[in-house]
Image (spheres, coloured by chain):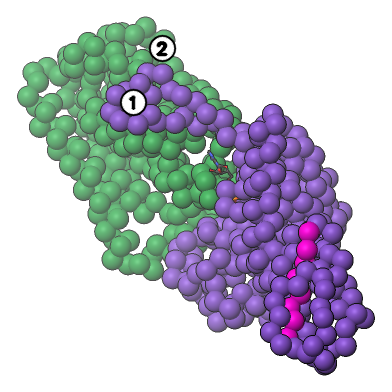
């Protein structure tokens, strides 16, 4: 079974009523409610190939969770369509459920009063996993996530990190080809986060699972994802590799060079501007939309000047993302203004 | 329902029950709460009924059949289908979302969430009351009557489940609808144990056609004790109580399914 995800023109509008301010406003809202339509997800299309890990990124309220809910069969889209491992999730919910694993960082899917291991064995029955296979997988997961130190504890007594690790194992026990994770590492300490990332990497590289992940942790994105899909206000802003995103939005690099001769006159290079000069120390930065990447800039500086030392500061992915979010904000506004 | 499904239900129930056993004091307290709740309803009903003369023309041993039927049906409901009652909380906590990503009907997952320990208390009291009612009854308990009584108990359980499933379906759209389930529980507990003909007509009418409470115990008991002609509804309608319970439950489950398809989710 091929674990691909295909999303075509997927949209979801929520209808809510807004309350008018004040007491009289409240009464008026009761009699004549003002309905507003909120386009949480609007005409989104992308593909995830089998065995690929894709990070779905965007600021708060961008529509990430709503997208995942449609792909897991929780919500029905208002327009467009999606296929997960060949199944339309919201039409064949239970069939889709057998093909996917899902982890929602904020909520557990385990039985609250039962020890973790008993939840696991119930899930084994539900998904009809053969006993030997179940035991082998549990062993594998235990090695990666160190579950055995707490798996005889009731779920209600687990710490957050322990619970999410248990949830992660629970979501993958039936060997699903496709896995959805909505902020899986929220609230975890650095050690556990790394453990979880290692686990996910293993699931993608060794087990060939397709993973769609949302997170606000850019370190996580850097460590795990090659490709990202960026959405804002429910619209797709960008679908590309991390490098492409850096090139597009990460125009905040700096090249710091120490000139061999401190009296050399320094002029801007094509697409590169001189930011500062302190004696032999010069700092270059990108200039305009045609700015080269940091690596090209480095090359140009070395070719043009005789330097004794050179260093570069690449923009943190976090800064790149901030730039991407802000710019996509402007673009969405343009579109709204034009419409 | 497949064999595997039944096995899972049995297994989860057993595990849930064992989990509750481990909290011993909580376990015993839950049973006590169930029992005390039921007993207090009975005491209240007895006191109130003894104030009425004639009890709407019913013999006192016949009247006892009404609370006994209602309570046993209710205990069965709590035991088998009662979790529908707290579903609003599940919805607000987003648990429904996690149920939706599992290959099992959501309704069943709601039922398997925990073991209803208080049902043991409910059941004990209700069985006791039913035994008392049957032993004092002067009716001839033929196989036909007993079968009809059992059908009515199941029908009553399904009818109560139907009412709570309707409220649960509403809370899928409007989480605040869950408050109605508390109101419903109060109302059923308060009025379920009386011959409705001692109540004002309008109230009786409401409890027949508004909330179909009359079909849980009053109509079945009336039919069993030969008062089926004086209930205020045609005899055939009163006699069809168990069937109506089953139909109401079926309808409620369809509504639930439809509502799940239109579920908008909680944010987060
Ligand atoms: N059930 C709902 N009813 C009404 N509006 C909703 C509902 N669910 C989501 N929304 C709205 O849709 C938009 C997208 O929400 P969504 O939860 O998908 O964002 P997100 O990208 O996951 O954000 P975050 O990073 O904060 O988790 C938000 O504006 C939100 O208020
Ligand atoms: Mg979210």
Q: Colour of chain B?
A: green
Residue A111 visible in the picture: yes
Classify mark 1: helix, strand or loop. helix
Residue A73 x/y as whole percent: 67, 43
Q: In the image, which lettered chain appears purple? A: A
Residue B237: mark: 2
Judge whether A33 appears above or below B19 on screen: above
Residue A25: mark: 1
The Cα atoms of the two marked residues, 2 and 1, are separated by: 47 Å
Name the main secondary structure of what is drawn in magenta: strand
The residue at the point 29 percent across, 24 percent down is A24
Left/right placement of residue B146 relative to residue A3 reads left
Residue B128: mark: none
Query: Where the N terminus of chain A falls, by quadrant?
Result: bottom right
The residue at the point 57 percent across, 52 percent down is A60
**Frontmost residue, B16 versus A36:** A36
Classify mark 2: helix, strand or loop. helix
Query: Where the C terminus of chain A falls, by quadrant?
Result: top right
The verdict on label 1 being within 8 Å of ligand 1 is no
The residue at the point 61 percent across, 62 percent down is A216
**Frontmost residue, A63 versus A203:** A63
The residue at the point 56 percent across, 30 percent down is A37
Residue A169 x/y as whole percent: 65, 68
Q: Which residues are magenta?
A: A281-288
Letter of the chain that mark 2 sits on in the rendering: B
């Amino acid at each position: 079974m091929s674990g691909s995800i295909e999303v075509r023109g997927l949209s979801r509008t929520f209808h809510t009523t807004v309350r008018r301010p004040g007491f009289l406003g409240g009464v008026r809202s009761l009699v004549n409610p003002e309905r507003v339509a909120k386009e949480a997800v609007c005409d989104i299309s992308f593909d995830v190939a089998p065995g690929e890990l894709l990070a779905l990124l965007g600021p708060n309220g961008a529509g990430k969770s709503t997208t995942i809910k449609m792909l897991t069969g929780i919500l029905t889209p208002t327009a467009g369509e999606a296929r997960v491992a060949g199944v339309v999730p919201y039409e064949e919910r239970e069939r889709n459920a057998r093909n996917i694993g899902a982890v929602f960082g904020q909520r557990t899917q385990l039985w609250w009063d039962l020890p973790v291991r008993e939840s696991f064995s119930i899930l084994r029955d539900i998904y009809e996993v053969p006993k030997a296979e179940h035991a082998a997988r549990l062993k594998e997961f235990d090695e990666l996530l160190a579950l055995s130190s707490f798996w005889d504890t009731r779920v209600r007594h687990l710490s957050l990190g322990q619970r999410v690790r248990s949830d992660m194992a629970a979501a993958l026990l039936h060997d699903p080809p496709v896995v959805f994770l909505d902020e899986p590492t929220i609230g975890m300490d650095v050690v556990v986060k790394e453990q979880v990332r290692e686990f996910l990497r293993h699931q993608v590289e060794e087990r060939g699972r397709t993973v769609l992940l949302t997170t606000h942790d850019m370190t996580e994105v850097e460590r795990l994802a090659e490709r990202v899909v960026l959405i804002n206000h429910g619209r797709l802003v960008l679908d590309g590799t991390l490098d492409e995103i850096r090139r597009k939005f990460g125009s905040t690099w700096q090249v710091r060079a120490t000139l061999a001769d401190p009296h050399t006159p320094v002029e801007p290079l094509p697409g590169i501007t001189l930011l500062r000069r302190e004696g032999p120390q010069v700092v270059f930065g990108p200039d305009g939309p045609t700015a080269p990447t940091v690596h090209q800039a480095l090359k140009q500086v070395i070719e043009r000047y005789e330097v004794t030392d050179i260093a570069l500061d690449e923009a943190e992915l976090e800064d790149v993302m901030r730039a991407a979010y802000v710019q996509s904000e402007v673009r969405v506004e343009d579109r709204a203004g034009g419409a | 329902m497949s064999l595997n499904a039944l096995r899972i239900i049995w297994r989860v129930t057993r595990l849930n029950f064992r989990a509750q056993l481990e909290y011993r004091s909580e376990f015993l307290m839950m049973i006590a709460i169930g029992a005390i709740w039921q007993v207090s309803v009975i005491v209240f009903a007895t006191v109130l009924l003894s104030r009425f003369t004639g009890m709407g023309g019913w013999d006192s041993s016949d009247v006892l059949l009404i609370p006994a039927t209602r309570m046993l049906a209710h205990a069965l409901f709590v035991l088998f289908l009662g979790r529908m009652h707290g579903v609003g909380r599940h919805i607000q906590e987003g648990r429904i979302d996690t149920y939706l990503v599992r290959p099992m009907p959501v309704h069943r997952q709601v039922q398997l969430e925990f073991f209803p320990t208080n049902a043991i208390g409910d059941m004990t009291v209700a069985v006791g009351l039913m035994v008392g009612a049957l032993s004092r009854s002067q009716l001839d308990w033929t196989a036909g009557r007993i079968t009809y009584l059992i059908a009515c108990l199941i029908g009553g359980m399904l009818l109560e489940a139907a009412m709570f499933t309707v409220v649960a379906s509403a809370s899928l759209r409007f989480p605040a609808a869950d408050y109605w389930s508390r109101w419903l529980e109060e109302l059923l507990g308060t009025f379920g144990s009386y011959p409705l003909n001692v109540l004002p007509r309008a109230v009786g009418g409401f409890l027949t056609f508004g909330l179909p409470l009359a079909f849980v115990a009053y109509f079945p008991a009336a039919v069993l004790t030969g008062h089926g002609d004086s209930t205020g509804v045609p005899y055939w309608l009163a006699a069809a109580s168990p069937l109506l319970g089953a139909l109401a439950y079926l309808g409620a489950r369809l509504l639930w399914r439809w509502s799940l398809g239109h579920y908008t989710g909680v944010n987060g």
